[in-house]
Amino acid sequence: MDINDNEFVEKFIVDSVRLIKKTSDTFTKSITLNIGFTIPQLNVMRELVTEDGLSLKELSKRLNLSHSTVSGIIDRLETRGTVIRRQDTCDGRFTQIFISEKTNNYIKNTMNKMYTPFINAIQSALPEEKEKILEGLSIFCRLLK
């Protein structure tokens, strides 16, 4: 690998990102077909399983999506009884979003399945490989922002 060959480096990175996306898409498509949620809906629910009671603003920020996009997703999830909106007890101007109890465990199990190929790859990596992966992804994500 010639690090000074920009064309080679660019192609390698783009091909790597495509492989990661293809791996993710293959797993998530089978899951979404079985459960009837879209990927953005699953991502919203994953955030709420991780930290319940977030505002639309915070969810939008964490998911890198517009406020109106997340609001639409929450509307559809609320209609299905998957999430619940509640007025903030301290400040009535704000609304907090919670995952419904019936959905919480289900989503935890589903999300674990979605990331199985990545989790398996990470678990099989040597400590120094994990360190390099973290460093490389951190740099790449910083450059994308």
Image: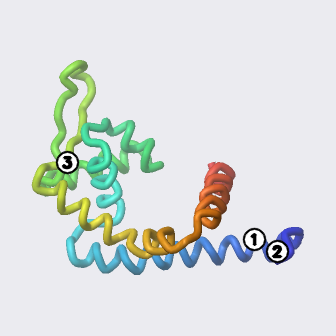
Q: Is residue 119 above or below residue 85?
A: below
Q: Looking at numbered disc 3 in the image, what kind of residue is underneath it?
A: Ile
Q: Earlier in the sequence, mark 3 or mark 2?
A: 2
As rendered, which of 107 and 94 lies closer to the eye? 107
Instruction: List the residue tagged with mark 3.
Output: 99
Instruction: List the residue tagged with mark 2.
Output: 7
Q: Looking at numbered disc 1 in the image, what kind of residue is underneath it?
A: Glu
Instruction: List the residue tagged with mark 1.
Output: 10
Q: Position of residue 30 (x, y in %)?
A: 31, 80
Q: Is residue 17 left or right of residue 79?
A: right
| Distance from the alpha carbon under mark 1 to that under mark 2 | 5 Å
User: Count of labels shown?
Assistant: 3
Residue under the image location 78 percent in, 72 percent down: 9
Q: Earlier in the sequence, mark 1 or mark 3?
A: 1
Contact? badges 1 and 2 (CB < 8 Å): yes
Snapshot quadrant of residue 131: bottom right
